[in-house]
Image (cartoon, rainbow, N blue to C red):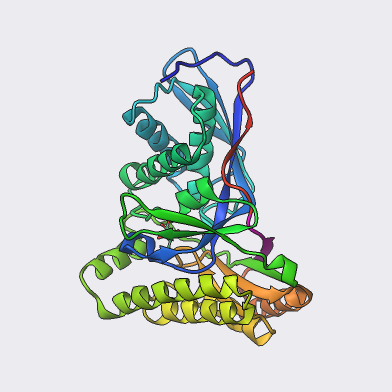
Amino acid sequence: MAGVNSPSAPVVARAPGRVNLIGEHTDYNGGLCLPFAIGLATIAAVRPRGDDQLRVTSREAVPGDPHWQEYVVGVLAELRRIGWEVPGLDIDLVSTLPLGGGLASSAALECAVATAIAGLLGVPLDGAGRRLLAEACRRAETEHVGAPTGGMDQLAAMLGSDGHALLIDFADPDSPVTAPVSFPVAEDGLVLLVTDTRVRHVLADGDGGYAQRRREYARGHPRRRRHVVTENARVRDAVDAIGARAWARLGALMTASHASLRDDYEVSVPQLDQVVDTGLEAGALGARMTGGGFGGCALTLVAADRAGVVREAVDAAYAERGWAPPRHHLVEPGPGAEVLRGIG
Ligand code: GLA
C-alpha cells in the first residue's frame, strides 16, 4: 500500500444517493434488486493531519440521524482493517441529499469518504476497487453503526453508471453479482418523480422496524417470505419490461411491488400509500415506496407532461390531511462515486 503524499489541497470526492426502482427488502434475503444512482449526492473533502486524530465537520444539520459521525469513524476503521494506511484526517462534508430520507444518504456519506481516501492513497477505482469500497462501507454501517442493512445502497453508489440501473443478485451475499441495465425512460418521454414524504426513519437496531423485519423473515414468517419471492419475480419481469421499453408494464410492476410492501412486508406508512394512490389517480404509470420504508420517499413513473399534475395532486392530498408539504425531485440514472479533485 502506497503511503500518503502530502497534498496542499484536500482530495475531494462525490458519492451519489440512490433510488431503488424495484426489488425492496430483498438484498439481505439473497434476492434481486434494481437501484440506480441519482444526481443528489454527498461530497467529502479530506486532508491528512499531522497527528492521528479524526475531525469531521458537516455543513448540514443532521437532526434525523444521531449516528452520522459514526458512519465516518466506521469507514476509517474498516479501511484500516483491510490494510490501508489511513492517516489522521480533517474531513469536511456537504450534501444535497435529504438526510435519513430514504435515498441512501448514509451510504453516500460512507462512499464519499471512502472514495476520497482512495484518491488520497492513490488506490485505483477500477471495478474491483469499487466493490472493495462498497463492502467496506456496508460493514461500516452494519458493524460500527449497528444498522443491519443489506449491500444494495453502497453497491449502487459505487457501481452506478449514467443512463443505467444496476441489477444486483445477492444469491451469494459475500459476492453479489451485478449487471448494468440500460434504462432509457427519458428518451420515451417519461420521468421519475421522487416524493419525499418528510416522514423520517432510523435504520439502526432498536427502531422496531427494519431490524424486526429481518428477524421475521429469517424465522420464516409466511407473508414476509411471500413478499420476497414475489418481489424477486417482479425484478426479473421489470428487467424484461425495460428491455422491451414496455413502460406501462414496468409501472404495473412498481405498483404491485408497493402493494406487497404495504400488505405482506408491512413497511409502508399512510403518507407513502397516499403518494402512490394519488399519483396513480392522477395518471402515473406506476408508483411505489423506495428504500427501507417507515417513511422516506416514494417513486412515481409518469409521462413528462403529466408530472406537474401528479405533483399538484399529491400536494393537495397532503394539504387536505394537514401534513407538512412533501418535497419532489426529478431523478435520472447518473454516475457512481468519483474523485473530483485528486492529489496535486
Ligand atoms: C435500506 C437498506 C438496504 C435495503 C433497503 C430495502 O435502504 O440500507 O440495504 O435493505 O433498505 O430494500
**Residue shown at 48% from the left, 35% from the top:** 114
How far from the left and from the top, in percent, is residue 108? 53, 46
How far from the left and from the top, in percent, is residue 278? 63, 82
Query: In this image, 305 relative to 98: left or right?
Result: right
**Residue shown at 64% from the left, 20% from the top:** 9
Residue 63 makes an appearance in the image: no
Q: Main secondary structure of the magenta part?
A: strand
Tell me the quarter of the picture where residue 233 sits. Answer: bottom left
How far from the left and from the top, in percent, is residue 99? 55, 52
Of residues 72 and 8, which is closer to you in this image?
A: 8
Specify the farthest residue to the bottom. 281
In the rendered picture of this protein, how many numbered marks are placed on residues?
Answer: 0
In the rendered image, the vertical position of residue 260 relative to residue 40, given as above or below:
below
Tell me the quarter of the picture where residue 52 sits. Answer: top left
In the rendered image, the vertical position of residue 258 relative to residue 72, given as above or below:
below
Tell me the quarter of the picture where residue 69 sits. Answer: top left
Magenta residues (range): 326-333
In the rendered image, the vertical position of residue 267 relative to residue 156, given as above or below:
below
Specify the farthest residue to the right. 305
Give the quadrant of the C terminus: top right
Give the quadrant of the N terminus: top left
Query: In this image, 29 relative to 154: left or right?
Result: left
